[in-house]
Image (cartoon, rainbow, N blue to C red):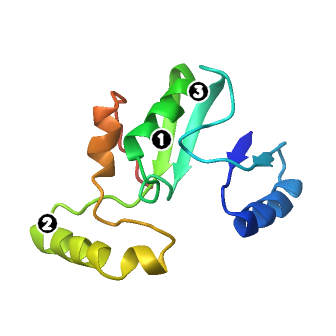
């Protein structure tokens, strides 16, 4: 398993946690727009609260799909835009004012689900 973390403090914490993991985990410096690894070299990709933060979501998705083998999976846990109009208005207001500044660049109002679908990756919902 390879984990990517661009922020030095969080990377150091992740490296400490990886040392205790029951599987081999390598934590490396990097960003979602230039992943280490050859094309189609991973069985799966996991994005956890990253697609709401990266500057170019489509580029990050293209990189994920580049390294995931055909038939592999992308698993994600991300902020997505709400569909009730009043909730999405709040998300857009938060994005335009305070939220990215207090949440490491996160954008609550990104349409991450559509972004993944536009990158030609099918989404199957699994809850619970």
Residue 72 position, x and y percent, is 53, 25
- Label 3: how many Cα within 10 Å (few below 14, some 14–19, many 20+): many
Q: As drawn, is 23 to the left or to the right of 125?
A: right
- Residue at 76% x, 47% y is 28
- Label 2: how many Cα within 10 Å (few below 14, some 14–19, many 20+): few
Q: Which residue is mark 1?
A: 60
Residue positioned most to the top: 70
Q: As drawn, is 41 to the left or to the right of 62?
A: right
Camera-side residue: 21 or 126?
21
Disc 2 versus disc 1: distance between alpha carbons? 27 Å
Residues at discs 2 and 1 in contact (Cβ within 8 Å): no
- Label 1: how many Cα within 10 Å (few below 14, some 14–19, many 20+): many
Camera-side residue: 96 or 12?
96
Q: As drawn, is 74 to the left or to the right of 100?
A: right
Residues at discs 1 and 3 in contact (Cβ within 8 Å): no
Disc 2 versus disc 3: distance between alpha carbons? 35 Å
Disc marking residue 8: none
Nearest-to-viewer mark from 2 and 1: 1
Disc marking residue 84: 2
State which tag comes first along the sequence, 2 or 3. Answer: 3
Determine which quarter of the picture holds residue 90.
bottom left
Determine which quarter of the picture holds residue 121.
top left
Nearest-to-viewer mark from 2 and 3: 3
Residue 109 position, x and y percent, is 28, 63
Q: Secondary structure at mark 1?
A: helix
> Does 64 sit above or below residue 96?
above
Q: Secondary structure at mark 2?
A: loop
Residues at discs 2 and 3 in contact (Cβ within 8 Å): no
Determine which quarter of the picture holds residue 37.
top right
Disc marking residue 67: 3
Q: Quadrant of the N terminus?
A: top right
């Amino acid at each position: 398993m390879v984990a990517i973390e661009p922020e030095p403090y969080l990377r150091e914490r992740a490296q400490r946690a990886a040392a205790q993991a029951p599987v081999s985990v390598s934590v490396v410096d990097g960003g979602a727009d230039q992943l280490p690894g050859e094309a189609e070299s991973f069985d799966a990709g996991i994005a956890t609260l990253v697609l709401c933060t990266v500057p170019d979501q489509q580029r990050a998705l293209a990189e994920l799909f580049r390294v995931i083998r055909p038939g592999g999976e992308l698993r994600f846990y991300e902020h997505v835009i709400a569909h009730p109009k009043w909730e999405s208005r709040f998300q857009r207001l938060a994005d335009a004012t305070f939220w990215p500044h207090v949440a490491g660049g996160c954008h609550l109002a990104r349409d991450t689900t559509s972004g993944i679908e536009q990158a030609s990756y099918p989404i199957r919902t699994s809850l619970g």
